[in-house]
């Protein structure tokens, strides 16, 4: 690891001395110039790059979906430093504490993954009972862009944004087109996608259907799922837009690792998820408005008898206004009503008791962005959160950025994050505790961004997390049961991140990142060292990408328990366009490394995925 770090430092020096090239957003990893770029953060507010006081990664999915196999979360694992995604299958993730798809950002995430908030077009997406996102819902076909906000972000986004936020932007129906793809590969893996868009006057519609299936790389690890999404939007009264989006995702999987399996039967699960979002957005004078009503419904059934129904109903309203060239105000109000019930249909007397549990939550935030001087930007804000759990939270933020030079930014920020206890932790099982309080984190970040060329940039940052009130199972002073969920865990984490993005010559992209974290006692899936690389080269019309990561000091449990071996995972992909067709092939785990992603659970070895995509505009 010392050699890797020294190599990164040497590349950074060479990079600073390298000449910059002209900016072209279509042939590079998404980078921005400090003076002339605006970001819309998680569909909630606009902010110039020079005014930002924390770190955000923006990943254009359509540009890079040829380097993924089944989920946009794979892109965060490639392009976002200090982000670790747990994968143990060829296709699909599954659910549960031993499932995969968990995302840890800067040492926080949880198990299951309720400490990272996933948004779809700015609205929270999580399972109402267990509080975690459902990663198999997030296919590739419908997502246009991924935004990763590293570090606590509860001021704007509320509960679960302790470690950070991942916002999936589905985009809007575009010009008339048909896009269809078919892929097949090792372990009986097949993936099919269809994307159809049609414009009728001022109304645009879009239908996307995808299917994924695999036999799995080890016995009883198969997966099969569908993802159906429909969109319709219509523009009226000038710039106002009405959007309706719905999604239905049924999938099934087998996972022999999720529980004790003396009969060697595996553990099959059947998941059904449905979501609807209705939104209206547009300007009113200088005020930019967005209003959304949405719902998220789910049914989960496992062969051990566990069955659950969960729901989420939500309303959100976001506004922003530029009062002057120096001052911008952003505010929002969101309300959630979520819950569900579960039971064991095989053993009705066993927990959980089939009772309905619900939570109501209302929160509002106000953030001001002030540029008192040409080269200085200040940000400050506060959220107030009220819940039916008799838990009320205040979550402040503050930050400042300074531009000593037009190509250099220095910034620092303070963020407070929190996570409400889930219904599972509060009520469902004997270990539950209705007296639980929220987990909290206070975080500081200091960083710099250097732009010696419009397409080249070097990012460095240091962060510190003071985590408290961690919910964990501890010995019960008044058994039974012998164990019980309690608040009280603490951790002091710190780490450094570095990312180098540059173009050494035309039609090439290189991104290299190295991150280190001292996770304290929260070692579960928080590797101490991560080295990631991505290299894309165009040879005439052929696009070739080489990408991978080296992971060191990885554990499957907190407290440095269940150590996993270090590993280097290398992949290569190639795409060749021919008229309306794109032929692509991927070689995953190119070096055929043997490693474990969970104790006793081997990761997929070398495997291939190849296919063809038809793009037909009309």
Image (cartoon, rainbow, N blue to C red):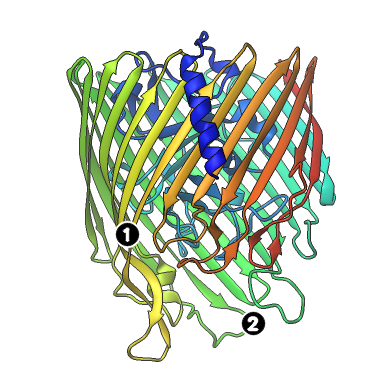
Q: Residues within 10 Å of mark 1 (few under 14, many from 20)?
A: some
User: Can the viewer see residue 170?
Assistant: no
Residue for badge 1: 360
Q: Depth check: give the residue in front, 436 or 88.
A: 88
Determine whether, in the image, residue 369 is placed left or right of residue 182.
left
Res 95 quadrant in image: bottom right
Seen at 73% across and 71% down, the residue is: 266
Seen at 25% across and 19% down, the residue is: 286
Q: Position of residue 351 (x, y in %)?
A: 51, 82
Determine whether, in the image, residue 381 is placed left or right of residue 440.
left
Q: Position of residue 528 (x, y in %)?
A: 49, 52
Res 472 quadrant in image: bottom left
Mark before the other along the chain sequence, 1 or 2: 2
In the rendered image, the quadrant that contains the C terminus is top right
Q: Answer yes or no: do the residues labelled 1 and 2 have beta carbons within 8 Å? A: no
Provide the secondary structure element on which disc 2 rests.
loop
Q: Position of residue 566 (x, y in %)?
A: 62, 54
Q: Depth check: give the residue in front, 167 or 211.
A: 167
Determine whether, in the image, residue 573 is placed left or right of residue 60.
right
Res 410 quadrant in image: top left
Residue for badge 2: 346
Provide the secondary structure element on which disc 1 rests.
strand
Determine whether, in the image, residue 458 is placed left or right of residue 61.
left
């Amino acid at each position: 690891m010392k050699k890797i770090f020294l190599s990164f430092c040497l590349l950074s020096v060479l990079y600073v001395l390298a000449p910059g090239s002209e900016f072209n957003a279509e042939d590079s990893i998404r980078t921005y110039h400090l003076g002339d770029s605006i970001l819309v953060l998680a569909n909630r507010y606009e902010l110039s790059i020079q005014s930002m006081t924390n770190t955000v990664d923006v990943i254009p999915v359509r540009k890079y979906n040829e380097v993924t196999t089944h989920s946009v979360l794979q892109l965060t694992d490639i392009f976002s430093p200090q982000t670790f995604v747990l994968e143990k299958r060829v296709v699909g993730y599954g659910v549960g504490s031993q499932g995969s798809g968990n995302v840890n950002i800067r040492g926080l995430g949880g198990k299951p993954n309720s400490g990272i908030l996933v948004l779809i077009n700015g609205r929270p997406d999580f399972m109402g009972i267990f509080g975690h996102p459902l990663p198999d819902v997030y296919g590739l076909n419908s997502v246009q862009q991924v935004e990763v906000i590293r570090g606590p972000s509860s001021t704007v986004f509320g509960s679960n944004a302790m470690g950070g936020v991942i916002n999936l932007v589905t985009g809007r129906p575009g010009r008339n087109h048909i896009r269809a793809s078919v892929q097949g590969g090792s372990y009986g893996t097949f993936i099919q996608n269809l994307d159809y868009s049609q414009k009728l006057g001022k109304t645009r519609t879009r239908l996307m259907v995808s299917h994924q299936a695999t036999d799995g790389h080890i016995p009883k690890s198969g997966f099969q799922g569908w993802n159906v999404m429909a969109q319709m939007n219509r523009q009226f009264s000038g710039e106002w837009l009405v959007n309706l989006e719905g999604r239905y995702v049924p999938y099934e999987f087998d996972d022999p690792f999720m529980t004790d399996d003396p009969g060697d039967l595996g553990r099959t699960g059947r998941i059904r998820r449905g979501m609807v979002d209705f939104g209206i957005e547009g300007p009113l004078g200088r005020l930019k408005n967005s209003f959304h009503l949405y719902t998220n419904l789910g049914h989960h059934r496992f062969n051990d008898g566990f069955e659950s129904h969960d729901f989420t109903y939500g309303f959100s309203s976001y506004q922003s206004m530029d009062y002057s060239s120096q001052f911008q105000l952003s505010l929002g109000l969101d309300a959630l009503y979520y819950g569900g019930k579960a039971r064991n249909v095989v053993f009705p007397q066993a927990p959980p008791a089939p009772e309905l549990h619900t939570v109501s939550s209302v929160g509002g935030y106000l953030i001001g962005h002030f540029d008192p001087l040409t080269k200085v930007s200040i940000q400050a804000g506060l959220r107030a959160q009220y819940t039916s759990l008799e838990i009320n939270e205040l979550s402040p933020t503050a930050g400042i950025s300074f531009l000593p030079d037009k190509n250099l930014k220095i910034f620092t920020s303070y963020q407070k994050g929190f996570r409400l206890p889930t219904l599972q932790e509060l009520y469902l099982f004997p270990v539950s505790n209705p007296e639980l309080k929220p987990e909290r984190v206070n975080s500081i970040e200091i960083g710099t961004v250097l732009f010696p060329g419009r397409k080249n940039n070097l990012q460095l940052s240091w962060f510190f997390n003071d985590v408290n009130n961690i919910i964990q199972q501890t010995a019960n002073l008044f058994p039974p049961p012998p164990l019980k969920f309690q608040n009280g865990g603490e951790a002091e984490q710190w780490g450094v991140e570095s990312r180098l993005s540059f173009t050494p010559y035309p039609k090439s992209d290189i991104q290299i990142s190295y991150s280190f974290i001292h996770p304290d006692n929260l070692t579960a899936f928080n590797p101490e060292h991560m080295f990631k690389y991505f290299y894309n080269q165009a040879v005439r019309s052929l696009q070739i990408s080489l990408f991978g990561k080296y992971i060191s000091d990885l554990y499957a449990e907190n407290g440095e328990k269940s150590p996993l071996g270090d590993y280097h995972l290398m992949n290569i992909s190639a795409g060749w366009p021919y008229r309306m067709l794109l032929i692509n092939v991927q070689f995953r785990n190119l070096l055929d490394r043997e490693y474990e992603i969970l104790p006793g659970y081997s990761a997929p070895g070398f495997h291939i995925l190849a296919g063809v995509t038809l793009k037909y505009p009309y």
